[in-house]
Image (spheres, rainbow, N blue to C red):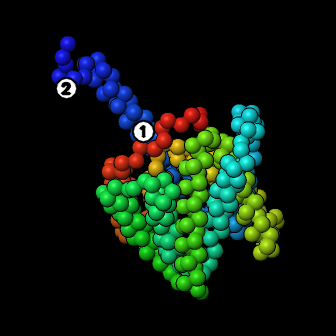
Amino acid sequence: MQYPHGIPPAIAVTAVMRCRIGIRERNVKKLLILLGVFGVSLSAPFVRISTAPAMVLVVYRVTIAAALLLPYALLRNREELRRMSGKTTVLCLTSGLFLGLHFTCYFEAIRHTSIASAVALVDTEVFFVAVMMFLQLKERIPARAWGGILLTFVGSLLIAMSDAGGGDNILLGDLIALTGAACMAVYTMIGKVCRRELTTTAYTLLVYVSAALTVLVILLIRGTPLLGYEPVNWLAALGMAVFCTLLGHSVFSWGLKYESPAFISTVKLLEPVFAGLLGVLLFKEIPKTQVILGGCTIILGVYVYSRFSESRGDTAEQASD
């Protein structure tokens, strides 16, 4: 029997249904990644109630996150961790090293340049990721998707410029911020590679341990005290560990299995938008018109990138979580 276009109706209907289910599942994954961005944006309220140095909070935060993950990992992922190759282990620990360096560079940059410059330059992570995607994975980002990336960056600039200020060594601070962006990009790209064969739990456990050790060593070299701060700092660190790390960065690591690293980096630029909304709800801080305009630009940019990106992620992987 001859069918129109040579495709039996049953097969055609099945293909359409699978396509629709695939689109639905992809949208759910993107929504979860957006919720991860919201989790990361909660760091601002927690920092607001803390009194300890930011880098000390980073050590507390990632150490607590690793401690919370450890029992679950030993219960569910012990065999996976035991069979992990030396090369994969080194990659995970290296990823955590660059995450720790990113945190260090960001807070160090703020000491020398304006918050505006530090935020804007750290947000260039997405451009570093795009270059690395082409060099490492041979993936090109469509021209229209590049338009979305540029829109999100312009929106970030608008938000950052509304908080413009000075610094004692602007050039040094800007260079450190750019280094922080590059470190975050390396962390993201290594995560993409590791997540091809590792579960989120196994990967992030090693990453958080490595990041904690990295920042700890830096603080010890500087002679910064790790203890002696008010108890509220432990509460803030616990909140950041649960919401910003486990429900934030871990969600990004989970999403790297299914989405392009450039998409993850672009969506993360929504963080100041969510943080601004939290500022309104929790602290009655009404954002400036320029901040609102920047937030709308970022949202538009994320939509444009998501709409026109041709990357489909690695949905065929076998790791379960």
**Image point 64% across, 62% down: which residue?**
98
Disc on the earlier residue, 2 or 1: 2
Which is more foreground, mark 2 or mark 1? 2
Q: Can you name the residue that lies furthest to the bottom here?
A: 168
Does residue 258 appear in the picture of this structure? yes
- With respect to residue 225, does 80 lie above or below? above
- Quick check: 278 left or right of 147? right
> Which quadrant does the C terminus fall into?
top right
- Quick check: 114 left or right of 142? right
Q: Position of residue 18 (x, y in %)?
A: 37, 27
Disc 1 packing (10 Å; few <14; some 14–19; many ≥20)? some
Figure quadrant of residue 182? bottom right
Q: Please state which of residues 78 and 219 is positioned toward the viewer in this rendering.
A: 78
**Identity, as a three-letter code, of the amino acid under mark 1:** Arg
**Identity, as a three-letter code, of the amino acid under mark 2:** His
Residue corresponding to mark 2:
5
Q: Position of residue 153 (x, y in %)?
A: 41, 66
**Image point 38% across, 30% down: which residue?**
21
